[in-house]
């Protein structure tokens, strides 16, 4: 294991690693240049020169910034003179990637052409964003800066609460219009105790993992008042003696969330908060019926149409992508992105959201952590202003409902009259929220942005689009109805088959490039990288359980299974390991009695091992090609 200059661990020497990345860039650039009838020779020379001087940051930070300036030019219709800092220009265009740019913008003025080359648009996005989200740790200074921004955001929320003009009654009125059916059903479910708690596979702030989560020895008095430990955390009341081993924590004693960083980009990490196991357990209990109700056409015994269904998404991103594609073609829909979205949803927003629904309100308060510990800074925030950070199971649906309510507040301001049910229905298919990806009609954008700003929420202007033909939402990028989403190189380059996760990622990257039609680059990856690690790399279907190559040619059967006569190919298969751990007899019984997606008999060793599986090695096997 060697160390990169930015402090990241890697599996190749730094010089060799960057050489591999620049070689891949060259192959892509040459193939894309052939698509666009231009040359990328000088672009590659400039890239090598800049990488030698600036290191890996040119590929992972500078090039993505170039790509963002390019997207802004597509949106506004011209290249701003202040765009592309650090790159020499000739006329209105940078010299770097100039062959592609000249097919999109007028070389002298930088104004967008009437009919820009769509292949060139895709090419620039692919070449600039290729390494933008590679999973490498940020430098220590950037990580510390991200934690400091988390603290700063808390201070800004506190200031907002002191000086805002938040109209809670108007917010509650719109929320009732949108979600009254859902909230009424949730009140009923919570009152009757029809909740099923669950444990997730992730880490927790109290360091309880796997099956041991079913032996909870801490609970909070806030949970106990609505969700008694005896009703939710033991198999039944015959095991009431478990109360003797449980500490019921008063509010001041509760375990704080642990704020940590995980890789996102080399510019900045992603900041998340690990919840205590007992809190996450009951968050999951509230989450699942809430999601089901929000996405259902009809809720409970109510025969009327659920008004909010179709406006929110939690399981499928395709509706957002379809609307983004439509907006890029017709120009009628905008895609908005929020900065620090989760961390800027204030508790006041949420209390106004569920006002008038006492059991739901108590449930989301009882399952909310009020303190946050930031070990990297040696700081503990004792009274959080935000509702929840990313990491809370309820963060995603709660923020989506807050954002949707805020959008319709803006729409109401545009209409200059109180919204009615028929008004909301008229926006079906034109408004949608998935996390912090918002889609709204273009003519409502100024009003929606003002509405968001009044709530202390920030629109990321650099990732929001409504004036040109470019749109992006939920990982789908479109220009004039054409998909221009780049294929991203996500992980480090493996040096051997023992780097199982990296090998998986490389194969997935290769197959996505093939589906994009970049067959020359795909062939180069097969010959220079994958072929040296996986000597058996047959054609397989996308659903195959082995590592194989995607192709429009059919797979070739190498043998038939002796028992089933099913076709088989010789291929490498990734072996996953689930960490070994076990619970007590009571905890094991509780796990078996709780309904879950995985039935106990589907894994006969589920009481001996649990948690998030890890790719541990790769073995050569006879495998199904489909």
Image (cartoon, grey):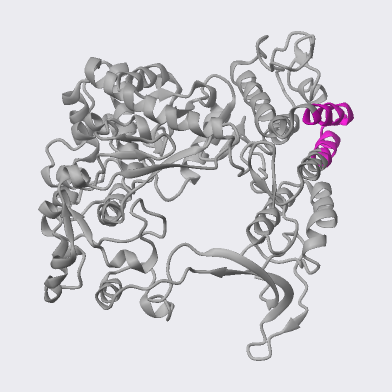
**Residue 352 picture location, percent across and down:** 19, 31
Residue 336 included in the magenta stretch of the image: no
Residue drawn at the location 26% of the way across and 45% of the way down: 306
Quadrant assignment for the C terminus: bottom right
Residue 339 is at least partly visible in this image: no
Q: Out of 505 and 454, give the one closest to the viewer.
A: 505
Q: How many marks?
A: 0
Where on the picture, by quarter, is residue 599? bottom left
Highlighted magenta segment, given as a residue range: 26-52
Secondary structure mostly taken by the magenta-highlighted segment of the chain:
helix
Residue 32 included in the magenta stretch of the image: yes
**Vertically, is 166 above or below 5?**
above
Residue 291 is at least partly visible in this image: yes
Residue drawn at the location 41% of the way across and 75% of the way down: 606
Left or right: where does residue 40 sit relative to residue 471? right
**Residue 178 picture location, percent across and down:** 25, 37
Q: Out of 505 and 209, give the one closest to the viewer.
A: 209
**Residue 400 picture location, percent across and down:** 34, 38
As drawn, the residue found furthest toward the front would be: 378
Residue drawn at the location 54% of the way across and 69% of the way down: 577
Where on the picture, by quarter, is residue 310? top left
Left or right: where does residue 184 sit relative to residue 117? left
**Residue 187 picture location, percent across and down:** 14, 49
Q: Out of 582 and 545, give the one closest to the viewer.
A: 582
**Vertically, is 484 above or below 575?**
above
Where on the picture, by quarter, is residue 238? bottom left
Q: Out of 222 and 302, give the one closest to the viewer.
A: 222
């Amino acid at each position: 294991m060697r160390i990169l200059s930015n402090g990241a661990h890697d599996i190749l020497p730094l010089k060799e690693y960057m050489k591999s990345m620049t070689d891949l860039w060259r192959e892509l650039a040459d193939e894309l240049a052939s698509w666009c009838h231009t040359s990328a020779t000088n672009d590659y020379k400039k890239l090598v020169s800049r990488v030698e001087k600036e290191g890996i940051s040119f590929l992972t930070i500078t090039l993505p910034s170039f790509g963002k300036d390019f997207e802004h030019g597509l949106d506004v219709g011209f290249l701003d003179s202040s765009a592309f800092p650090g790159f020499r220009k000739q006329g209105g265009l940078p010299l770097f990637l100039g062959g592609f740019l000249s097919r999109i913008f007028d070389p002298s003025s930088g104004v967008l052409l009437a009919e820009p080359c769509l292949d060139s648009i895709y090419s620039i996005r692919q070449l600039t964003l290729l390494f933008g989200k590679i999973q490498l740790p940020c430098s220590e200074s950037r990580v510390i800066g991200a934690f400091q921004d988390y603290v700063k955001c808390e201070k800004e929320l506190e200031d907002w609460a002191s000086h805002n003009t938040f109209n809670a009654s108007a917010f509650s009125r719109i929320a009732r219009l949108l979600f009254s059916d859902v909230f009424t059903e949730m009140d009923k479910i919570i009152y009757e105790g029809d909740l099923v708690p669950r444990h997730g596979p992730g880490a927790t702030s109290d360091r309880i993992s796997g099956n041991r989560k079913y032996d909870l020895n801490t609970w909070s008095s806030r949970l106990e008042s609505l969700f008694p430990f005896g009703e939710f955390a033991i198999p039944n009341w015959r095991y009431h003696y478990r109360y003797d081993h449980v500490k019921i924590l008063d509010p001041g004693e509760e375990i704080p969330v642990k704020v940590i960083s995980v890789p996102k980009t080399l510019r900045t990490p992603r900041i998340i908060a690990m919840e205590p196991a007992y809190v996450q357990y009951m968050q999951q209990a509230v989450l699942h019926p809430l999601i089901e109700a929000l996405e259902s056409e009809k809720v409970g015994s109510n025969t009327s149409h659920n008004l909010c269904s179709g406006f929110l998404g939690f399981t499928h991103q395709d509706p957002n992508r379809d609307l983004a594609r439509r907006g890029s073609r017709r120009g009628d829909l905008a895609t908005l992105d929020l900065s620090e979205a989760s961390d800027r949803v204030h508790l006041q927003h949420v209390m106004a959201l569920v006002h008038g629904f006492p059991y739901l309100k108590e449930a989301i308060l009882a399952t909310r952590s009020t303190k946050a510990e930031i070990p990297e800074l040696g700081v503990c925030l004792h009274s959080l202003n935000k509702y929840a950070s990313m990491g809370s199971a309820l963060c995603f649906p709660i923020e989506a409902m807050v954002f949707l309510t805020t959008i319709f507040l803006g729409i109401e301001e545009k209409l200059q009259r109180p919204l009615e049910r028929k008004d909301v229905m008229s926006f079906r298919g034109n408004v949608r929220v998935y996390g912090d990806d918002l889609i709204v009609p273009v003519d409502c954008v100024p009003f929606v942005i003002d509405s968001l700003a009044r709530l202390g929420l920030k629109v990321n202007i650099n990732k929001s689009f409504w004036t040109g033909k470019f749109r992006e939402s939920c990982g789908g990028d479109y220009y004039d109805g054409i998909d221009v989403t780049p294929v991203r190189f996500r992980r480090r380059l493996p040096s051997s088959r023992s780097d199982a996760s990296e090998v998986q990622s490389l194969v997935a990257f290769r197959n996505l490039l093939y589906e994009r039609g970049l067959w020359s680059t795909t062939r180069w990856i097969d010959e220079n990288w994958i072929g040296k690690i996986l000597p058996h790399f047959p054609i397989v279907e996308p659903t195959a359980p082995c590592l194989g190559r995607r192709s429009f040619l059919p797979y070739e059967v190498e043998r038939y299974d002796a028992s089933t006569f099913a076709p088989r190919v010789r291929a490498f298969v990734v072996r996953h390991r689930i960490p070994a751990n076990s619970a007590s007899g009571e905890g094991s019984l509780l796990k078996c009695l709780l309904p879950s997606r995985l039935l106990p008999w589907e894994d006969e060793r589920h009481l001996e091992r649990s948690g998030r599986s890890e790719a541990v090695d790769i073995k050569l096997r006879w495998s199904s090609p489909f």
